[in-house]
Every structure is written in structure tokens, then in C-alpha cells.
Image (cartoon, rainbow, N blue to C red):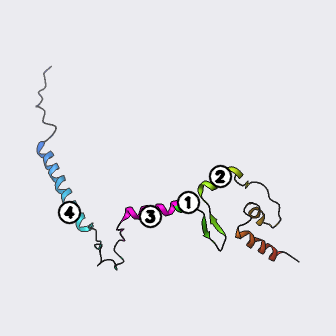
Amino acid sequence: MAESVRPPETRDVWPRALIAFGVGLLVFLAVSAVALKFVFDTTPVWPPPGPAAESDRESPALQRTPESDLAAFRSKEDKELTTLGWVNRTADIARIPVEEAMKLVAQDGLPNWSKSTAALDGECTLLDQNVPRAPQVGNCRGGAKAGAGP
């Protein structure tokens, strides 16, 4: 058998085509970035803070001393959590310190909300048994008495 003569193999990668593709890709990315910059304006437009912009409603309200503001806020919260005081005096709603509230819950336990209630005043019974001094109980009692038949 006669041997067939094969021509030599050519290169698999053509360097000129690869370099042309890379340069074309970089040019495309650069042109795209410039086009996107023109289409989407990304520069922030905030008026400068200061006396001239204080009357302007568009200017951001910046804190002058955030550290001292936070310290004052936390001390106010701590005072509210550790002292007795009125939340709403006309409605007879007060606050007690957290430590005292935890002692009361540990001493008396939580109310049993799942127990069945007798229908004394309809829906007011559960509230009356568990929170008798709440102003809502008086409103509920008044409404039950007003709605009662002769």
C-alpha cells in the first residue's frame, strides 16, 4: 500500500484574530460605558448643608452632634425603664420599672388566658378578671349595662 501524503497541520489559534477580538471587545466596553454615562446621570444632586439650605426642604436634615444626641436618647430611655411614671394619667395608664414588673410576674405568674370565663358581662369578663383597673373595663361595663334589656 502506498502511503498517503498529508499536508502539515495548520495552527489551531490564529493570533491576529484573537488580538483583533480582544481589542474589539475592549473598544465595545469603553463605548458602552461612555454611552451609559450619558444615558444615566449618576451624579448626586444634594444642596450643601448650612444656613443657606436650612430653609430648603430638599436638603437632608443632618445632626450636628450625633454622639450626644444618641447619649441623651439612651439616658431618656433608661430613665423611663427604671422609674415609675404616668403614660396617660387621664386613662389611668402608668409604667413601672422593668425589674419590678419581672418580680411581679415571677411572684404572681402570667394570667391564664386559656381558661373559660363565665358570661357575666359578655366579652368584658376576661378583661374584668385579669385587668380590673383598666379604663376599658368601665367602658365595657357601661356599655353592657346600657345594652341590657328591661
Q: Which one is earlier in the sequence, the residue at label 4 or at label 2?
A: 4
Q: What residue type is labelled 2?
A: Lys
Q: Which one is earlier in the sequence, the residue at label 4 or at label 1?
A: 4
Q: Estimate the spatial distance between the alpha carbons at disc 2 and disc 1, rounded to whole Å.
A: 14 Å
Q: Is mark 1 on a helix, strand or loop?
A: helix
Q: What residue type is labelled 3?
A: Ala
Q: Residue at x 80, y 66 (%)?
A: 122
Span of residues in magenta:
58-78
Residue identified by numbered label 4: 34
Q: What element carries label 2?
A: helix
Image quarter where the N terminus lies is top left
Q: Which amino acid does label 1 sit on?
A: Leu
Q: Residue 103 carries which label?
A: 2
Residue identified by numbered label 3: 72
Quadrant in the rendering for residue 65: bottom left
Above-or-below relation of 8 to 112 = above
Query: Does the magenta run of residues contain 27?
Result: no
Q: Estimate the spatial distance between the alpha carbons at disc 4 and disc 2, rounded to whole Å.
A: 68 Å
Quadrant in the rendering for residue 55: bottom left
Mark 2 in CB contact with mark 1 (< 8 angstroms):
no
Q: Which amino acid does label 4 sit on?
A: Val
**Label 4 CA crowd tier, 10 Å (few <14, some 14–19, many 20+):** few
Q: Estimate the spatial distance between the alpha carbons at disc 3 and disc 2, rounded to whole Å.
A: 28 Å
Mark 4 in CB contact with mark 1 (< 8 angstroms):
no
Q: Is mark 4 on a helix, strand or loop?
A: helix
- Where is residue 64 shown, x and y percent of the image? 34, 68
